[in-house]
């Protein structure tokens, strides 16, 4: 695989700083058959500090890495290092571990690379520029992509048939252009992008291709900037339905979903049911769903300020742009959803992140969000993004009621 096949995210840095967060997350790490074979051949014994009977957990159709009693990976040692890495080198680790937090998505002749911001180093933009990591990433892509990755068809833009990759990628590039630059807030940029995509859908312009498409998209984007010159001073409030679904989505992103918790089925479900009922009522207090998100009054969250600093604006802009540049919002990378629906769902992450940041701030006794709250909220949201089941009917219902735009505008204040 040539490095020229790779498109790396602009303005994004990343190196693993060995914090071990991903190894302590308690998530199910899938093992491919070749991973299992390799681990079997590594002949782990009690003398290595692991219980050989607990390093692989077999399900009905798949296998995953085992966990220690504290939820950490079975191979994590007391010093926070991976025993497989230490004994056999990086290439001996399971593929999912080698890849995290990177994502690599085929797009015609190209491979689009992105990152999960659930990794603190990715969220904080720490480490080596991604642009300099092409050689290593090409090797990694070769290790896990199928031979026929170039045959994967593009997703549809809307409900019509799919375009050719170059025409589809024109829409993606224009979405990225919409979110680029530092002149405007990310809230305003998302509103404008939602606006011109609505026009594409309403005008049945999802089949435009070739040179003419550039002009049409230019005109739609210019029109969006004219129609929405600034964030609305008095935004229309989201409907009760929109607010309810926002709170439930916040809850989905706030909870700590570890194998251990899910295994204690009745207790976990009861706790989440109580939290969901409180969220649905939206009066009284939240439930504490993790250490940093305490029991606080809903009114305190609604009154907390989420005016963003330039640093937080930059984090959110980078987050959304990396998602778009790596196609991590539609097609095979996101439940086979078309571009427009996938982007609407992605835009919904914005009010979810701001609501979570407010909850973090209020939990810490503050009345305005800090940069740390925003960074943490982005990490929490991206921890679940594209892993938890996607409810397409929810995005579609919210769109029908114009609640996606309203929620973005409301929480951008
Ligand atoms: S969370 Fe990120 S920085 Fe921390 S160990 Fe995992 S990949 Fe490395």
Image (tube, grey):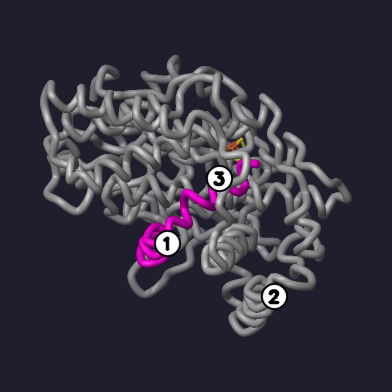
The image quadrant that residue 305 belongs to is top right
Residue drawn at 46 percent across, 43 percent down:
93
**Residue labelled with disc 3:** 409
Q: CA distance from mark 2 to mark 3?
A: 25 Å
Left or right of 4, for residue 301 = right
Mark 2 or mark 3: whose residue is earlier in sequence: 2
> Does the magenta run of residues contain 393?
yes
Tell me the SS state at disc 3. helix
**Residue labelled with disc 2:** 278
Residue 285 % position (x, y): 79, 70
Residue drawn at 40 percent across, 49 percent down:
344
Would you say residue 258 is visible in this rendering? no
Give the image quadrant in which the ligand numbered 1 is located: top right
Q: Nearer the viewer, residue 55 or 231?
A: 231
Q: Nearer the viewer, residue 161 or 219?
A: 219
Mark 1 or mark 3: whose residue is earlier in sequence: 1
Mark 1 or mark 2: whose residue is earlier in sequence: 2
Q: CA distance from mark 1 to mark 2?
A: 24 Å
**Residue labelled with disc 1:** 401
- Residues in magenta? 389-413
Tell me the SS state at disc 2. helix
Q: Nearer the viewer, residue 336 or 49?
A: 336
């Amino acid at each position: 695989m040539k490095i020229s096949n790779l498109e790396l995210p602009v303005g994004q840095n990343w190196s693993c700083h060995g914090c071990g967060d991903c190894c302590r997350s308690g998530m199910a790490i899938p093992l491919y058959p070749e991973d299992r074979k390799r681990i079997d051949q590594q002949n782990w014994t009690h003398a290595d500090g692991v219980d050989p009977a607990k390093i692989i957990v077999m399900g009905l159709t798949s296998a995953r890495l085992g966990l220690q009693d504290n939820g950490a990976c079975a191979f994590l040692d007391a010093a926070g290092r991976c025993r497989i890495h230490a004994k056999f080198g990086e290439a001996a680790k399971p593929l999912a571990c080698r890849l995290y937090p990177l994502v690599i998505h085929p797009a015609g002749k190209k491979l689009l690379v992105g990152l999960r911001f659930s990794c603190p180093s990715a969220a904080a933009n720490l480490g080596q520029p991604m642009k300099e990591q092409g050689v290593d990433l090409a090797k990694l892509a070769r290790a896990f992509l199928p031979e026929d990755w170039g045959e994967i068809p593009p997703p549809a833009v809307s409900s019509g048939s799919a375009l050719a990759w170059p025409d589809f990628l024109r829409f993606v590039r224009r979405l990225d252009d919409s979110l680029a630059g530092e002149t405007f807030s990310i809230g305003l940029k998302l509103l404008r992008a939602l606006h011109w995509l609505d026009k594409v859908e309403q005008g049945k312009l999802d089949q435009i291709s070739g040179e003419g498409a550039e002009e049409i998209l230019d005109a739609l984007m210019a029109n969006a900037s004219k129609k929405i010159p600034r964030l609305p001073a008095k935004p229309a409030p989201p409907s009760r339905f929109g607010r309810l679904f926002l709170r439930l989505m916040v809850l989905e992103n706030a909870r700590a979903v570890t194998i251990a918790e899910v295994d204690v089925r009745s207790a976990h479900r009861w706790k989440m049911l109580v939290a969901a009922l409180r969220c649905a009522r939206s009066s009284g207090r939240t439930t504490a769903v993790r250490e940093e998100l305490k029991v606080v009054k809903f009114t305190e969250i609604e009154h907390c300020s989420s005016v963003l600093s330039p640093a937080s604006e930059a984090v959110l802009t980078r987050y959304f742009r990396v998602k778009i540049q790596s196609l991590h919002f539609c097609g095979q990378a996101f439940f086979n959803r078309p571009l427009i629906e996938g982007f609407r769902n992605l835009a919904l992450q914005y009010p979810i992140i701001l609501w979570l940041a407010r909850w973090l701030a209020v939990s810490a006794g503050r009345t305005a969000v800090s940069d740390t709250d925003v960074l943490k909220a982005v990490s929490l949201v991206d921890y679940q993004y594209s892993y938890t089941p996607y409810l397409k009917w929810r995005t579609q219902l919210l769109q029908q009621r114009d609640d996606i735009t309203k929620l973005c505008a409301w929480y951008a204040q």
